[in-house]
Image (tube, rainbow, N blue to C red):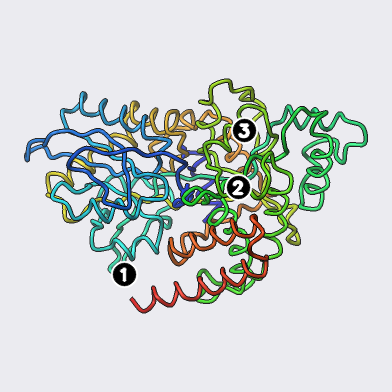
Amino acid sequence: MKKKLISALLCVSMVATMLVGCGDNGSTDEGSAGGATAGDDAEAGDDAEATGDEGGSASAEGGKVYYLNFKPESDDMWQQIAAEYTDLTGTEVKVVTAASGQYEATLTSEIVKEDAPTLFQINGPVGYQNWKDYCMDLKDTDYYSWLLDKSLAIEGEDGGVYGIPYVVEGYGIIYNQAIMDKYFATEDAKAASMDEINNFAKLKEVVEDMTAKKDELEIEGVFASTSLLPGEDWRWQTHLANLPVYYELKDKDVTDIDELEFTYADNFKNIFDLYINNSCSAPGTLTTMDVTSSMAEFALGQVAMVQNGNWGWGQINDVAGNTVTESDVKFLPIYTGVDGEENQGLCVGTENFYCVNSKASEADQAATIAFLEWLYSSAEGKNHVTNDLGFIAPFNTFEDSEKPTDPLAQEVLRYMEDSSKTSVSWNFTIFPSQSFKDDFGFALGDYCNGSKTWDDVVETVKTRWAEEKAATTAE
């Protein structure tokens, strides 16, 4: 599937971000910090916040669009896109953005309202099971027909298509080439170039030497802060956690598992300890850190590295006083000490799938599909997708010249093109629940604070995975 997708992306056309966000956001993957209040008829409920612009009702004949956005960091751009489309077509487009870590809660609150979202997103098969009663079959749309690799779509048991991926993203360790070059020039440096850093042992050796030389390098730490503030921890309990799950599933030759043995727990600990012990922030302070602050530390040249995805370029580029130059922003795979990882690439995939509300009126459904098709086929829409949202879009409507130009998206493409590297697939779409991820994040915070041992973290992961998988099966 990977080769099929890559070939098509390179030959025909070419999106991350959290959280969660993440995310993951979610997902995942998932957004970063953010979120304010929505309009009067788009309140997100007692336990969630949302941001967005409000508009009046469009005519029944033309229908209207209400998109519930997942990523707070892209809210401003979505508002601009909505306004442009409304000016162009007369169709009302309202965008409401859920606060970081609150997408499911916000969607739960909004979907039952009379003015419910007509367009929303799910994070894969698990998300589809939660929201399948609200997902319209999109199999007969042009939008689906443009998908390069149709195996990526979310299908129902009836063969219908209920979720369409709208972006391919990649994540790893982002590094500042200028700082690394400065390190390579130091006396007794542990490597002469980034080419030598192709496994965890060498990465650890270099990072710890850089920490010892941080004054000489004029940095506050090698890594940016490991954001473990609740709702901001998707980079670790989802994105970083994907690696041990990926390798365990690979060993067992399965695509899902009811009981996670966490075979690669020590490998997770390897890189997590390297992050927190060679950071610009002390481990005991990390439960107060958010993603935006972490990315700003990198943008301001205070640190050399930060784990995140290609969606993070906007956060880096938009920081006031940014000192890192575009040509110096590069990716390194997340090495954890697994045998053969010298051939490992970035973590590449998607957990972002658009769904159209099956309970919306036919006019609103038609308006929503038309909006998506404009966004992914018109010159104006594709420009927004590629250059403003930073998406590597998996559709054949994108010409070769319409590939993303930002440095991190280009790095994702570079790794995907390298036949010697094997991308790590995104498996966090099978993570049993947000509750599992939240508890994993809490356990990591307690570990950093010294109130839990690593064995406690491992037990939490294994127990909560099994409990949440069993609960999902029972439902």
- Secondary structure category for the residue under label 1: loop
Q: CA distance from mark 3 to mark 2?
A: 14 Å
Q: Which residue is mark 1?
A: 157
Q: Position of residue 467 (x, y in %)?
A: 47, 75
Residue 297, numbered label: 3
- Secondary structure category for the residue under label 2: helix
Above or below, 234 relative to 323: below
Above or below, 421 relative to 305: below
Is 346 or 474 nearer to us in this picture?
A: 474
Using the rendered view, name the quadrant where residue 470 is placed. Answer: bottom left
Horizontal side of 317 relative to 141 (left or right) equals: right
Q: Position of residue 313 (x, y in %)?
A: 54, 33
| Callout 1 amino acid | Glu
Is 217 or 8 nearer to us in this picture?
A: 217
Q: Position of residue 177 (x, y in %)?
A: 72, 30
Number of numbered callouts drawn? 3
Is 187 or 143 nearer to us in this picture?
A: 187
Q: Which residue is mark 2?
A: 286
Residue drawn at the location 57% of the way across and 35% of the way down? 295
- Secondary structure category for the residue under label 3: helix
Q: Position of residue 305 (x, y in %)?
A: 68, 38
Tell me which label, 1 or 3, sits earlier in the chain: 1
